[in-house]
Image (spheres, grey):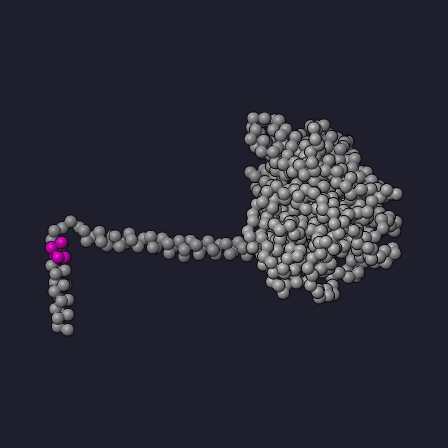
Amino acid sequence: MQPLSPATLLVLVPLLPLVGAVLTLALGRVLGSRAHLPAIAGIAAAATVAVMLLLGTSNQVGSAHGPHAEPVRPVEMITTLWQWAAVQDAYVPPASSAAAIPGTAVGGAGSAARAFTIPVALRLDPLTATLLAIITCIGLVVAVYSIGYMHHDPGYPRFFAVFSLFVFSMSMLVAASNFLVVYVFWEAVGACSYLLIGFWFTKPEAARAAKKAFLVNRVGDFGLAIATFLLWMTYGTLDFHDTLSPDGTILPGILGQTRLADAGGIVGGAVGTAICLCLLLAACGKSAQLPLHVWLPDAMEGPTPASALIHAATMVTAGIYLVARSAPLFVACPDALAAVSIVGATTALVAGLIATVQNDLKRVLAYSTISQLGYMFASLGTGTLLGFTAAIFHLVTHAFFKALLFLGAGSVMHSMGGVIDMRRFGGLRRVMPITAATFLIGSLALAGVAPFSGFFSKDEILATLHAKGWPNAHGEHHDAAPASHASLSLPLERVRSTSAPAAMRLASHARSPAPAAILDTPETFRTLFWMALATAGLTAFYTFRAVFMTFTGPTRVPDEAGHHAHESPPVMALPLMILAVPSAVAGWWLFSSQWLAHFLTATPSFSAPAVMATAVPHAFHMDLAIQGSLAAAIGIVIAAIGHLGRRSDGPQMERFLGPLQTFFANRCYIDQLYAGLVVRPLEGLAFAAALFDRFVIDGLVNGIARLPAALGGVVRRLQAGLLQRYALAGVMGVLAIVFVLAWRLRG
């Protein structure tokens, strides 16, 4: 039996969860308490295939270090499933447009017409392989946990159907190789999140949270739609990858290796900046960054497994993926790139401050997610190879320990009869020892305590921000020679080896020098570094505040739990123990082996010359590690002084914040600001429109409808059935005719 090809395996990763979702919908009622089987089987099979793809792609990249280390070169494979749309001669670039020239076929005229084609194509590269493995593996663990958590819910089959559909949509999003296809599954992920957040739709809070998430994300989705239009108008294609024209020439994709090999292939200036800012707006919506972060804390109204899936492996990582995939576009626009870091660092700090006074355990973790995603954006905005790989590194480690923490919170909620307010329980380490131990491991990883996973990925982000703020602090320089682009993968599931700069040279026009950057300065990144360092201390504080309030102090159990508070069943406890292992050791292994950084470097977007020129040798910076650890230690000590061993409903040290406590407890009044500036005016406009519709539009329509009836009523009175009236009317008519004729004859 021949082994399955990588192309077939790539198709199976999203296909298997889709099949599981369909079977669950079709057979859910028949299967009853076993309705989870199709979804679990589909996601488990997809996770197995995704790991196989990850290992296979890793073998193509080669060794990370040592005497047998291989030079990094782009690794890419495109599998086209079918042609969705094709409009011939849809794009004719103006001959005078320098921005359009890189989009023409090699050897073709500058004004040659191009077709508008939308292939449903999947790509396999290191970034895709990494995210597919994370999505499916974390999804599998959370799905197994859901068997116990959702067991008695009447919507049990519906939950697993939507859950599996969510995994399918996210897998397609990260595997798609066309911006329009990405947009389609960007919306599909949003629809799945709406269904999961509002899963308990009879609960008003859940219904409102689902609508809020859906509407806020529409703002970000509008940015992606505008960016897609601008990309088509600028490049004459929406494909990531290079394609072959009917005459055999190469048509460069937006992120294809042909374009990336050309120094002027990526458009900058006002158009490029507009594209990047629209992409950033889209990323802020999905990844809950300022000012579009307000939907994520309310999304906690959905089932806890859904929260774990959204926060750890699916929806909120979509924005990180979009910016990372579009790295060459952002690198060509330094100010847009710096805006990514500014938004990220600001979000991380603000969310961290809000989390310090939250008493709902799941909301603490929700704001923690917003803050940690801000870390990733701050790293991406540095525009360096270290920044891009560090962001994905933190995404990977964060997926493990954030899934662990959310499932731990769900275990507490399950045992406490649905209560999640930390002031109403305490000392649960005696009641739930497995949950307490695994939650502590996840908390140590989130707080960045060595040697747990978050320590290494967080310090990588601090290092990349520090390198941008103090360029020569560690003797680093960014003049490394770009990596060799020795291969080009085309959508024929094969690799054509050639010399990219020579054989695939794009027609080029002289480019005007880029304007001086306004935001991308060392001073900016120095400020962002100190903001990130302060956030590290806040992260440790609010994380261990939650640990101490929940698991230490005298044992307290709310009335809703009755006398049956106990450890979660094995089907829920086992996923906690599984996730605790990578939360503890994955960061150390990935950092010390350099495997992930070396692997991701072979992603075409990261191996572009503009990105590879920023490469620096792998190093461990002890001074930064000490600073990060000291910030974490201070946060933990302050949390211990205020909460360790104390009653969770007693006076809290946050009262010393004075008015700031109220300010942070009300989420910095951002929701109220939106209500005043957006919601209330729209409600007023809707009320005025309703009045106009009722009294003007309806009045006009109804008035016209009444007119025939009124006229008919007049005529009806003439038909009274009295012969005398008819005779009188006839005489009057004859007299009128005679009078008119006489008048005309006289004239």
User: In the image, what residue occupies the spot 80% across and 57% down?
Assistant: 468
Q: In this view, does 623 lie above or below 67?
A: below
Q: Measured from the top left, where is residue 240 in percent x and y?
A: 66, 50
Relative placement, left or right, of 160 versus 478 is: left
Question: Which of the pair 249/529 is nearer the observer?
Answer: 249
Give the farthest residue toward the bottom: 747
Which residue is more in the foreground, 361 or 660? 361
Q: Quadrant location of the C terminus?
A: bottom left
Residue 328 location, quadrant: bottom right
Is residue 728 within the magenta segment? Answer: yes
The picture places residue 727, in percent across and down from the top left corner, at: 11, 55
Residue 661 is one of the magenta-drawn residues: no
User: Who is closer to the viewer here, 732 or 168?
Assistant: 168
Identify the residue at horizontal 84%, vertical 47% (top origin): 629
Q: Is the magenta stretch mostly helix, strand or loop?
A: helix
**For the N terminus, which image quadrant?**
top right
Q: Where is residue 554 in the image (x, y as percent from the top left)?
A: 77, 35
Q: Give the range drawn in magenta.
A: 726-730
Q: Is residue 342 in view from this perspective?
A: no
Q: Is residue 396 visible?
A: yes
Q: Residue at x 61, y 33 (%)?
A: 20
Q: In which quarter of the image is residue 346?
A: bottom right
Q: Does 245 sit left or right of 528 as displayed?
A: left
Between 22 and 368, the one lying in front of the other is: 22
Image label count: 0
